[in-house]
Amino acid sequence: MRSPVASVTPPPVVLVLLGITTLQVGAAVAKTLFDEVGPTALVWLRLAVSALVLLALTRPRLRGLAGRDWLVVAGFGACLATMNWAIYQSFARIPLGIAVTIEFVGPLTVALLGSRRARDLVWAGLAALGVVLLGAERADLDLVGVLLAALAGLMWAGYILLSGAVGRRLEGLDGLALASGVAALLLAPALLVADSAGLADPRVLLLGALVALLSSVVPYSCELVALRTMSPAVFGILMSLEPAAAALAGIAVVGETLQPLQWLAVACVVVASVGATRRAAAVVAPVPD
């Protein structure tokens, strides 16, 4: 007999779109707090709250984990920490939509490398065109912000590759919960030199916890449920909407506007991602930031 909870579960497409929306709204809310607390401190707060929530929900079994299992989890956590730190530092310097567009080149590269079709060179070229177009409007671009977004994309690619290894070794969200804890621990020493005074403000703590829920717990949960019935190809195509969603969240929450060429650049990367994902359906790019 189907449970009452299952009968009211939204369609998987709705769940994925909800996860994309909350992720980018959470990022936009985080950016509004940068005047009160530094990006590094806010990333640590997000990771710490996410880890506590996920560990409480999953209660992962530690007994029986081999040294190699912990090594994979540690690598996963290192990618998670670096990815989130880099993209938040990028958010502090360039618009959300541009930062996520550059970051998305990481998972797009994984999708293209997973395909052996010569025609996928078209998608690679379209993505490259998008990145070049971003550089055509230099008024809003900061070189350090661009490089940090690229680093976040590189770590996102590593996150995707390691997520498969973690999934094979640990059940459900156990690996993600443990990796989130590792990520928070790895980033904790940075609080000694980061602008973290704002963490003493209850309002900042509350909004930081909200960011953690919007950008981590809700998207991860939505993906977990959606992927039970959704094909990886459809999931990957929907995930290609991330750059556009980030740009819209930047407009709605932060008041950031993009120039026409920058919107065209976002469109190029989105279309390239849809094309590459449709051809490389076996590659799934989960939401990390």
Image (spheres, rainbow, N blue to C red):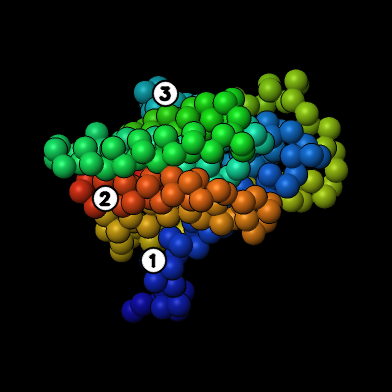
Residue at the spot of label 1? 13
- Crowd rating for badge 2 (residues with CA inside 10 Å; few <14, some 14–19, many 20+): many
Q: Is residue 107 left or right of residue 21?
A: left
Per the model, the C-alpha gap separating discs 2 and 3 is 34 Å
- Give the quarter of the figure containing the N terminus: bottom left
The residue located at (68%, 53%) in the rendering is 255
The amino acid type of the residue labelled 1 equals Val
Provide residue 22's location: percent of width, then percent of height: 56, 57
Q: Residues within 10 Å of mark 3 (few under 14, many from 20)?
A: few
Q: Secondary structure at mark 2?
A: helix
**Who comes first in sequence, dot 2 or dot 3?**
3
Q: Is residue 201 left or right of residue 252?
A: right
Q: CA distance from mark 1 to mark 3?
A: 34 Å
In the foreground, 245 or 218: 245
User: Mark 1 or mark 3, which has the lower sequence index?
Assistant: 1
**As drawn, is 28 to the left or to the right of 72?**
right
Front residue (pair 246, 179): 246
